[in-house]
């Protein structure tokens, strides 16, 4: 038989290679740890500055007193009035062609959305004719007779038998036209 000799001692050259590789691995791990630590610190600093700025903004907003612009309500009302379609409103007054009926007053209250027309009539019976003429073309009859007054020789009177001039006042909600 042949004798076999086994030498369990490694060659000394490989020890140096493994030592250099271990040193490089430790250096690389240290560099990664140092980089992670710097990044983590910078992130915490940025978050703390952002929180401080957010707190300052909150404090400034809390101290600020919002004052209402006195012209705001007037501007909103003007916008609302300008958006209304007044063609139907004016057409009602312009297209009334009754004999013995004359337009005396035109009052448009844009804030309340009400139009009032005052007509001078030559007879009391014209009040119903004017009401029918104003409501012509409307199914819901938006025009309403508000009042009829007669004026005689002695001033304003309720009795119309002696009245020479009769005045009627009609109103309508503009939204109903």
Image (spheres, rainbow, N blue to C red):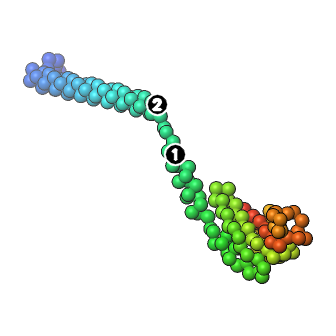
User: Which of the marked residues, 1 or 2, is nearer the chain's N terminus?
Assistant: 2
19 or 11: nearer the viewer: 19
Which numbered disc covers residue 131?
Answer: none
Quarter holding the C terminus is bottom right
Task: Count the labels in the image.
Answer: 2
* Observer able to see residue 12: yes
Q: Give the crowd class for mark 1: few <14, some 14-19, many >=20 residues within 10 Å.
A: few
Judged left or right of residue 74, residue 26 is: left
Residue 12 image point, x, y percent: 9, 20
Q: In which image quadrant can residue 161 be found?
A: bottom right
> Which type of secondary structure does the marked residue at label 2 adopt?
helix
Marks 1/2 in contact by CB < 8 Å: the verdict is no
List the residue tagged with mark 1.
Answer: 70
Which residue is rendered at x = 87% and y = 63% of the image? 158
Q: In which image quadrant can residue 173 be found?
A: bottom right
Q: Residue furthest left?
A: 13
Q: Give the crowd class for mark 2: few <14, some 14-19, many >=20 residues within 10 Å.
A: few
Quarter holding the N terminus is top left
List the residue tagged with mark 2.
Answer: 62
Residue 159 image point, x, y percent: 89, 65
């Amino acid at each position: 038989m042949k004798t076999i000799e086994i030498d369990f001692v490694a060659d000394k050259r490989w020890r140096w290679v493994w030592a250099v590789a271990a040193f490089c691995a430790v250096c690389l791990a240290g560099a990664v740890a140092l980089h992670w630590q710097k990044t983590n610190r910078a992130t915490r600093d940025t978050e703390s500055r952002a929180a401080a700025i957010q707190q300052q903004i909150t404090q400034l907003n809390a101290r600020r007193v919002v004052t209402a612009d006195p012209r705001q309500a007037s501007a909103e009302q003007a916008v609302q009035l300008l958006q209304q379609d007044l063609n139907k409103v004016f057409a009602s007054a312009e297209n009334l062609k009754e004999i013995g009926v004359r337009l005396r007053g035109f009052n448009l209250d844009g804030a309340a959305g009400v139009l009032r027309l005052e007509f001078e009539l030559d007879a009391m019976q014209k009040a119903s004719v004017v009401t029918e003429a104003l409501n012509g073309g409307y199914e819901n009859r938006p025009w309403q007779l508000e009042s009829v007054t007669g004026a005689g020789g002695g001033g304003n009177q309720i009795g119309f038998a002696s009245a020479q001039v009769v005045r009627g006042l009609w109103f309508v909600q503009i939204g109903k036209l």
